[in-house]
Image (cartoon, rainbow, N blue to C red):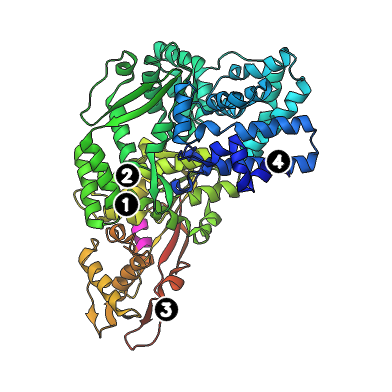
């Protein structure tokens, strides 16, 4: 076992190891939020735990490869000291600041702290440059930032062969410490970059589009076209910025914004560079843009929307010429230290308080809605684009849980251009991608929250599908005529029917007609529309009796009857545990009741079932007379039995136990 691991396993040795004292005795919580699922995971000892993980990886490599003592020593010492600038007691950090150590660029600061008690130039250089190979691959720095490593060879402090081995092992440890999957994905690229460094093949500054492609992991054709059309002066400013500075925590925060919004921020930064600026850090913005919601790390959508609102106020010309429009609620905030530019946003006191109120109000439905409407009014947000805010997070997870039920869709797709309307959490997009590598898959959604979530997921997991923010009622604005082989509507038409105020009327079947006609228009000949949605029972006049095992749950039914927006729903009380309802009213209640209290405020806005299967077929024949129905079925979706029959019993009018009504239909339409 490595000596450093023995120290970590023996608290008595902490005081004898200065590096360990700094990592252990700290109140700092510096960590890349991109690498955690919950901010609660970030503790005072998160950096210590990461260091422990990298040392364990080194120990495993050593057991497998039996490294030479000098190579093992160089890597182990580097890993021990490489994160210390993120930690330390208050008095340590004050001392380091007085000495001018760079605590914002943690690699530089850690190297400076190491040299206080050690004089090994090789290790100091390895600490200073550790992680820069990965940062170059991500696009955050230029390759020449690694030049000090080549100088070790040039000055004959270490051989080319030995440095190559050290760098390969060091990068394996620090990247596997973040993600084994990530290391596997970029392992070959890491080795190629290391070979460039040790052979003094430092390329010139990359084209600004290549840099932005790296920073965003991938750019769409539309984003590349946008960048190519930028004004020459703006291109020059971007090139100047990328040639001069390192970008810290870009991937953790900046990629949540559109490419145009990113350019606006980068231009503002370029205007405010000082001669001494080497590093631009987004660390403070990263720490403020995420927060804990139900034990998960989530974007602070309130702040994100306000930032977007502000950026959209400004034109590229405004920023390029430093002629900024002012907002009473938000503005850019830049702080300079010796070598760093720290970027963030400033908010007015009123907005800070309102954001805090929104965060607290998430636990109280009525307060929450008031808080959201205040934001809508203040910034002019469209409600149909933000209708769930944080309920969207849980809703999308629940949608993804129905993956097995959605697999039925795959049996009916026509290759190769596939469009899903309302992709939600992306489960169908992923299933399509997994089923066939040659499909061209797109999702279109009006919800800004959904689009943002999917864009982040696409970049994080390197998916090949694309996501478009757009309105299904204006589909031809985004998708050309006769271009798609399959259009999928999975549990989305009932939402359009419920939410869209078409001709001043929600719950309007004309909405469904427009949506299906648009989908038909974008289909190629022999293309298909696949509809999966709620279904009404054909036996509309029949009654069902619901027995609640917990009699207080009748209050949920009372509330539902008052709150449901789709139509009037009523019941007859049989006794203190039993009620009698029309079968389709019972269906509408029970399948809302299934989702639970957290989804309730949104579910009561929606009518899940709006046609029987026969009515749907007749409706399609009327609006799409030349189409062909090639599949039609209805069924009870998996999970409803499990979720409901532990809470209720269901009987017919004669008090005989009966099954739950069918919940879901599947219709496949073919274009002739």
Mark 2 crowdedness (10 Å alpha carbons): few <14, some 14-19, many ≥20: some
Q: Are marks 2 and 4 in contact (CB under 8 Å)?
A: no
Q: Nearer the viewer, mark 3 or mark 4?
A: 4
Is residue 258 found left or right of 7 in the rendered image? left
Question: What SS does tag 3 mark?
Answer: loop
Give whichever of 491, 249 is nearer the camera: 249
Question: What SS does tag 1 mark?
Answer: helix
Q: Position of residue 503 (x, y in %)?
A: 20, 48
The residue that label 4 is drawn on is: 3
The answer to whether residue 182 is visible is no
Q: Is residue 226 magenta?
A: no
The answer to whether residue 79 is visible is yes
- Measured in 3D between alpha carbons, the distance from the residue under mark 4 to the one under mark 1, in whole angstroms, is 63 Å
Please name the predominant secondary structure of the magenta segment in the image.
helix
Q: Nearer the viewer, mark 2 or mark 4?
A: 4
Q: Earlier in the sequence, mark 4 or mark 1?
A: 4
Mark 4 crowdedness (10 Å alpha carbons): few <14, some 14-19, many ≥20: few
Disc number at residue 659? 3
Q: Nearer the viewer, mark 1 or mark 2?
A: 1
Q: Earlier in the sequence, mark 2 or mark 4?
A: 4
């Amino acid at each position: 076992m490595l000596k450093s691991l023995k120290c970590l396993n023996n608290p008595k040795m902490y005081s004898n190891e200065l590096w360990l004292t700094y990592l252990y005795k700290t109140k700092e919580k510096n960590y890349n939020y991109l690498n955690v699922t919950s901010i609660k995971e970030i503790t005072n000892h998160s950096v210590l735990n990461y260091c422990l993980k990298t040392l364990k990886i080194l120990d495993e490599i050593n057991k497998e490869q039996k490294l030479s003592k000098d190579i093992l020593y160089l890597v182990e010492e580097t890993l021990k000291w490489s994160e210390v600038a993120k930690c330390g007691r208050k008095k340590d950090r004050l001392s380091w600041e007085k000495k001018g150590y760079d605590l914002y660029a943690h690699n530089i600061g850690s190297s400076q702290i190491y040299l206080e008690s050690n004089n090994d130039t090789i290790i100091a250089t390895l600490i200073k440059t550790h992680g820069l190979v990965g940062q170059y691959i991500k696009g955050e720095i230029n390759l020449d930032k690694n030049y000090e490593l080549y100088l070790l060879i040039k000055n004959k402090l270490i051989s080319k062969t030995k440095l190559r081995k050290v760098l390969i092992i060091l990068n394996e440890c620090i990247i596997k410490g973040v993600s084994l999957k990530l290391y596997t994905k970029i392992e070959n690229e890491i080795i190629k970059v290391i070979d460039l460094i040790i052979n003094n093949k430092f390329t010139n500054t990359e084209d600004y589009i290549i840099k932005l492609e790296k920073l965003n992991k991938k750019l769409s054709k539309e984003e590349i076209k946008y960048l190519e059309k930028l004004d020459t002066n703006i291109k020059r400013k971007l090139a100047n910025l990328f040639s001069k500075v390192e970008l810290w925590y870009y991937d953790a925060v900046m990629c949540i914004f559109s490419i145009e919004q990113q350019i606006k921020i980068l231009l503002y930064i370029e205007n405010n560079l000082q001669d001494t600026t080497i590093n631009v850090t987004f660390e403070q913005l990263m720490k403020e843009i995420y927060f804990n919601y139900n034990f998960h790390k989530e974007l602070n959508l309130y702040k994100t929307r306000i930032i977007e609102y502000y950026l959209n106020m400004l034109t590229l010309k405004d920023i390029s010429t430093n002629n900024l429009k002012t907002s009473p609620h938000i503005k850019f905030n830049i702080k300079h230290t010796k070598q760093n530019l720290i970027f963030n946003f400033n908010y007015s006191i009123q907005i800070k308080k309102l954001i805090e109120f929104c965060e607290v109000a998430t636990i109280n439905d009525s307060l929450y809605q008031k808080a959201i409407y205040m934001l809508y009014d203040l910034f002019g947000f469209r409600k149909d684009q933000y209708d769930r805010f944080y309920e969207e997070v849980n809703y999308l997870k629940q949608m993804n849980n129905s993956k097995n039920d959605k697999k039925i869709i795959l049996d009916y797709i026509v290759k190769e251009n596939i469009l899903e309307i309302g992709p939600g959490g992306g489960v169908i997009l992923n299933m399509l991608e997994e089923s066939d590598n040659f499909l061209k898959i797109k999702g279109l959604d009006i919800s800004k929250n959904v689009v943002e979530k999917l864009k982040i997921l696409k970049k994080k997991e390197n998916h090949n599908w694309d996501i478009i923010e757009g309105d299904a009622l204006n589909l031809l604005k985004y998708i050309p005529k006769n271009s798609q082989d399959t259009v999928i509507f999975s549990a989305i038409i009932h939402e359009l029917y419920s939410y869209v105020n078409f001709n001043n009327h929600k719950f309007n079947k004309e909405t469904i007609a427009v949506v299906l006609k648009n989908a038909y228009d974008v289909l190629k000949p022999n293309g298909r529309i696949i509809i999966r949605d709620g279904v009404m029972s054909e036996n509309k006049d029949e009654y069902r009796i619901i027995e609640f095992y917990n009699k207080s749950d009748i209050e949920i039914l009372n509330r539902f009857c008052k709150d449901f927006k789709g139509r009037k729903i009523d019941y007859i009380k049989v006794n203190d545990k039993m009620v009698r309802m029309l079968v389709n009213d019972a269906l509408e209640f029970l399948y809302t009741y299934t989702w639970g209290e957290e989804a309730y405020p949104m579910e009561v806005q929606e009518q899940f079932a709006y046609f029987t299967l026969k009515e749907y077929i007749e409706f399609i024949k009327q609006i799409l007379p030349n189409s062909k129905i090639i599949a039609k079925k209805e069924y009870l979706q998996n999970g409803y039995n499990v979720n409901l029959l532990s809470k209720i019993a269901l009987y017919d009018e004669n008090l005989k136990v009966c099954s739950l009504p069918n919940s879901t239909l599947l219709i496949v339409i073919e274009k002739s």
